[in-house]
Image (cartoon, helix red, strand yellow):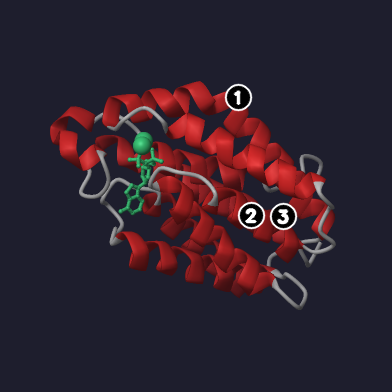
Amino acid sequence: GRTLTAEHALAWTGRFTEAVRRGGEELTELDRRAGDGDFGTNMRFALRRVADLLDGGAPDSAAGVFTALSEGFLQTGGTSGPLFGMWFREFAKGSAGGEVTTAVLARAAAAAVATVQRLGGAEVGHKTMVDAMAPAVEALRAEADRDAEVAEALSRAAAAAREGAESTRHLVAVRGRASYVGEHARGVVDPGALTVALFFEAAPEPDA
Ligand code: ADP
Ligand code: MG
Ligand code: MG
């Protein structure tokens, strides 16, 4: 379709939650090797809060779903909780009050990564979530330029985010706890970037 519906956003969030639940141990293991080993726990806590918020009444817009994601992550600890919370908050703001087209998503995603970078100070190549967020924005912009449908655009964003996450494997971190261990974390994919890939990979409807 041309727009992201509330139903699609809810199903997307459900698939993301399932992917993080399944990948939780791997995410924690990556953070154990490069940080303090709480990452999977932080993500599962956040998504439990999100599910509780959604159970309290399903939103009737994609913006409402993004708001629940934002609030759930903002209630979560670790560096990633507030950063993801503020990232989702920009998706909520950008989607509010109108049709959520590919162009709207591209603009929201651009504002979202800008906010994460303003708060955390990370650039692309610093081995953080930004390494997956920024390429997803570029993919969404290109898809908006060719007027692609939402599901198609999101699957291109997913491929770009996955490639960006993979690129963190050979980097030495400049930001976050992984920067404290330097060379020791080379070879370890950044779990925050991997989570961004899981998020976009959960977006396209399986039969779309
Ligand atoms: P903590 O180090 O507080 O335990 P988490 O385990 O919750 O943090 O999250 C770690 C993730 O946070 C990393 O994988 C990385 O993607 C992200 N991260 C850390 N510092 C920054 C930063 N300054 N900017 C953007 N992302 C960051
Ligand atoms: Mg951690
Ligand atoms: Mg921690």
Tell me what residue is drawn at x 46 percent, y 54 percent.
Answer: 82
Residue 107, percent from left and from top = 56, 73
Q: Is residue 65 above or below residue 103?
A: above
Tag 2 near tag 1, CB within 8 Å: no
Q: Which circle marks residue 154 in the picture?
A: 2
Q: Which circle marks residue 151 in the picture?
A: 3
Q: Nearer the viewer, residue 127 or 103?
A: 127
Q: Is residue 201 visible?
A: yes
| Callout in the foreground (1, 3) | 1
Tell me what residue is drawn at x 75 percent, y 53 percent.
Answer: 9
Q: Secondary structure at mark 2?
A: helix
Residue furthest toward the bottom? 97
Distance in Å between CA atoms under marks 3 and 2: 5 Å
Amino acid, disc 1: Arg
Distance in Å between CA atoms under marks 1 and 3: 23 Å
Q: Quadrant of residue 127?
A: top left
Q: Secondary structure at mark 3?
A: helix
Q: Is residue 184 above or below residue 54?
A: above
Q: Secondary structure at mark 1?
A: helix
Residue 126, percent from left and from top = 26, 51
Q: Quadrant of residue 32?
A: top left
- Side of 34 where 23 appears, left or right: right
Q: Quadrant of ligand 2?
A: top left
Distance in Å between CA atoms under marks 2 and 1: 21 Å
Q: Quadrant of residue 146?
A: bottom right
